[in-house]
Amino acid sequence: MAKLNYVTLMSLDGFIGDGHYDWSLPAKGSTEFITDVMRPFKTYLYGRKNFETMAYWETKDAASVEADHQDFVRVWQAAEKIVYTKTLKTTT
């Protein structure tokens, strides 16, 4: 059986946010760190709201984003996504 890993962004004092991610604007090097953390995961489990936020990356061409996001786009797009929702009708 595979391990289940939970990854979330939070501040050093444990703040996660209220559904808005303006508090967690990436600092230089943080995208590279998150990409390296997520790289070994082949499947991502999402709730509806988080998936809708992350779906932004699904249609991005790696060459069209800032250099420090290009690897993240490739890693994120390569993973399978499973969305747990009662309200979302389609994920594409």
Image (tube, rainbow, N blue to C red):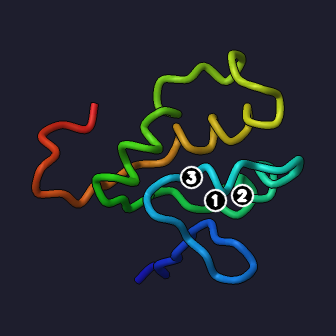
SS class, disc 3: loop
- Label 2's element? helix
Q: Position of residue 44 (x, y in %)?
A: 44, 58
**Residue at x-position 42% and y-position 37%:** 55
For image coordinates 31% across by 60% down, the residue present is 47
Q: Residue at x 71, y 52 (%)?
A: 35
Mark 1 vs 2: CB contact within 8 A: yes
**Foreground tag (1 vs 2):** 2
Question: Which of the numbered marks, if any, corresponds to residue 34?
Answer: 2
Disc ID at residue 76: none
Label 1 and label 3: CA atoms lie apart by 19 Å
In this rendered view, identify the residue nearer to me: 43 or 18.
Answer: 18
> Which residue in the rendered view is the most extreme toward the right?
28
Which label sits in the foreground, 3 or 2? 3
Q: Disc 1 or disc 3, which is closer to the eye?
A: 3
Horizontal side of 62 relative to 12 (left or right) equals left
Residue 21 is tagged as 3
Q: Is residue 81 left or right of residue 84?
A: right
x%, y% of residue 10?
Answer: 64, 71
Kind of residue sitting beneath label 1: Met
Tag 2 or tag 3, which sits nearer the N-term?
3
| Mark 1 Cα-neighbour bin, 10 Å: few <14, some 14–19, many ≥20 | some
Front position in the image: 92 or 22: 22
Residues tagged 1 and 3 counted as in contact (Cβ below 8 A): no
Residue that mark 1 sits on: 38
The amino acid sitting under disc 2 is Ile
Q: Earlier in the sequence, mark 1 or mark 3?
A: 3
